[in-house]
Image (cartoon, rainbow, N blue to C red):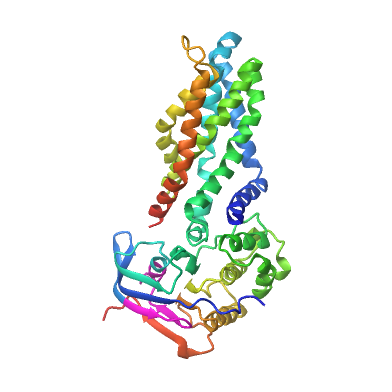
């Protein structure tokens, strides 16, 4: 258990010494929200209607941006190789890194949603739904991203391949994520059902990712 | 004093081992046994497969054929928990201090976390334990990796050019640490070009790679 906490603690401490990276993600997230009104016009009614989709796309893109940091530095300096001899099995180490990754790339976005909600003129109820849906959905996105990062970490230009690889797989998370905030017309009351689906997808992905990712890393280094 | 208690007794037994990197075969039909308290030196020109053999022994690279056994190992534990690898890549994080780096690995490897300070003293990094590891020279980084190896308390050491980047003192330190490891009943396999400064040539074996007669 202390070894598991040590893995999480090390990644958090490394990020704390390098706080620019987390800040970059948050700024990127917010700037997507800033530029969208310029593209679709300042009509606040349209913006309000599109806000859930914009928030989710901004979150998705920001998390793609942080993906390459998950395993690549550890691969390049030999840390991943030495992880293989740890007392803690590799899937547990990956699980610890996944938790740290979520804390560093998803939680800051959730905390930054008030800014985005303001820019997109969302009302208070929508804002809380956005927070809820991000909390339910981002663990799934992080897990999916980790699988992509694990598969591509040993490739030279893998950092660009991972987002392409996982984008189609993230579609269900986007659908249910947006539906949790604003259920499609004619399906009133289905928001909580969508939220449950979103939670189920996240749980499933978080459960299989440590094993899938460990397998990908083991095979990649061979 | 750290690292003096006897290590669990293990024997490394390799039979009909074949391997390489990618599609390229580098060695085949290797048979050797390394009993506790002995070291096997891997010799051969660059590209002969010394590192590949070490990575295969470390279970990082899958062999093309043959078997690697660590006899006497705890069947409850994964085979990797017997191995201490000292390779080219340091796995030391800049931005964490020297002590934090060592402490992290010692926790992860199930070593004695309380001995981190002694470990740093042992390799001559005691006074700079609080320094950012990014400021270490290549040789100091190797010393830190040596401290990790000692504190991880593993019976099987796999060393890849252990003296590279080290000064004269560092070379004798490597020799002394290996001697102590063998004294404790550990075993070691080391790829090396230079002669290691070992006390007792009687417990050294040599395997020549890459020279087919």
Seen from this angle, which residue lies furthest front? B76
Against B70, residue A130 (above or below) is: above
Against A8, residue B30 (above or below) is: below
Q: Judge from the rendering whether residue B111 lies leftward or rightward of residue A84; answer left or right.
A: right
- Identified at 40% across, 83% down, the residue is B206
Seen from this angle, which residue lies furthest left? B213
Q: Name the quarter where the C terminus of chain B is drawn.
A: bottom left
| Relative image position of residue A180 (x, y in whole percent) | 52, 21
Q: Judge from the rendering whether residue A152 lies leftward or rightward of residue A180; answer left or right.
A: left
- Identified at 51% across, 38% down, the residue is A142
The magenta stretch spans residue B43 = yes
Tell me if I can see residue A155 in this picture.
Answer: no
Residue B57 falls in image quadrant = bottom left
Give A125 or B102, whichever is nearer the viewer. A125
Count of numbered labels shown in the rendering:
0
The magenta stretch spans residue A175 = no
Q: What stretch is highlighted in magenta?
A: B31-54
Against B59, residue A195 (above or below) is: above
Q: Name the quarter where the N terminus of chain B is drawn.
A: bottom right
| Relative image position of residue A149 (x, y in whole percent) | 46, 44
Give B206 or B149, whichever is nearer the viewer. B149
| Relative image position of residue A83 (x, y in whole percent) | 50, 58
Residue A109 falls in image quadrant = top right
| Relative image position of residue A88 (x, y in whole percent) | 52, 57
Against B186, residue B76 (above or below) is: above
Tell me if I can see residue A115 in this picture.
Answer: yes
- Identified at 38% across, 57% down, the residue is A222
């Amino acid at each position: 258990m202390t070894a598991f906490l040590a893995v999480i603690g090390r990644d958090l401490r490394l990020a704390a010494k390098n706080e620019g990276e987390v800040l970059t993600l948050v700024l990127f997230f917010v700037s997507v929200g800033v530029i969208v009104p310029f593209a679709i016009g300042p009509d606040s009614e349209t913006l309000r209607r599109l806000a859930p989709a914009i928030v989710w796309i901004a979150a998705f893109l920001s998390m793609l941006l942080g993906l390459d940091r998950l395993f690549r530095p550890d691969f390049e300096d030999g840390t991943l190789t030495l992880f293989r001899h740890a007392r803690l099995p590799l899937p547990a180490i990956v699980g610890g890194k996944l938790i740290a990754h979520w804390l560093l790339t998803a939680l800051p976005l959730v905390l930054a949603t008030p800014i985005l909600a303001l820019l997109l003129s969302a009302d208070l109820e929508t804002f809380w739904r956005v927070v809820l849906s991000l909390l339910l959905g981002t663990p799934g996105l992080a897990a999916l991203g980790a699988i992509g990062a694990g598969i591509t970490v040993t490739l030279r230009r893998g950092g660009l391949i991972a987002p392409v690889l996982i984008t189609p797989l993230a579609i269900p998370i986007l659908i249910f994520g947006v539906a949790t905030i604003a259920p499609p017309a004619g399906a009133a009351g289905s928001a909580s059902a969508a939220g449950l689906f979103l939670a189920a997808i996240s749980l499933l992905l978080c459960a299989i990712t440590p094993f899938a990712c460990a397998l990908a890393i083991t095979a990649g280094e061979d | 004093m750290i690292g003096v208690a006897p290590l669990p007794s293990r024997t490394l037994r390799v039979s009909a081992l074949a391997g390489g990197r990618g599609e390229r075969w580098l060695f085949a039909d290797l048979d050797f046994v390394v009993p506790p308290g002995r070291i096997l030196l891997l010799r051969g020109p660059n590209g002969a497969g010394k590192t590949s053999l070490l990575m295969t022994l470390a279970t990082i690279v899958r062999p093309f054929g043959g078997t690697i056994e660590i006899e006497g190992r705890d069947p409850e534990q994964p085979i990797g928990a017997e191995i201490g690898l000292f390779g080219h890549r340091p796995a030391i994080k800049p931005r964490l201090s020297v002590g934090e780096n060592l402490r992290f690995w010692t926790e992860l490897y199930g070593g004695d976390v309380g001995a981190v300070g002694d470990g740093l003293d042992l390799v001559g990094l005691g006074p700079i334990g609080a320094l950012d590891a990014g400021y270490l020279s290549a040789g100091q980084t190797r010393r830190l990796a040596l401290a990790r190896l000692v504190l991880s308390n593993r019976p099987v050491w796999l060393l890849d050019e252990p003296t590279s980047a080290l000064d004269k003192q560092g070379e004798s330190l490597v020799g002394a640490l290996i001697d102590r490891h063998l004294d404790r009943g550990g075993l070691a396999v080391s790829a090396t070009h230079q002669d290691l400064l070992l006390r007792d040539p009687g417990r050294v074996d040599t395997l020549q790679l890459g020279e087919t007669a």
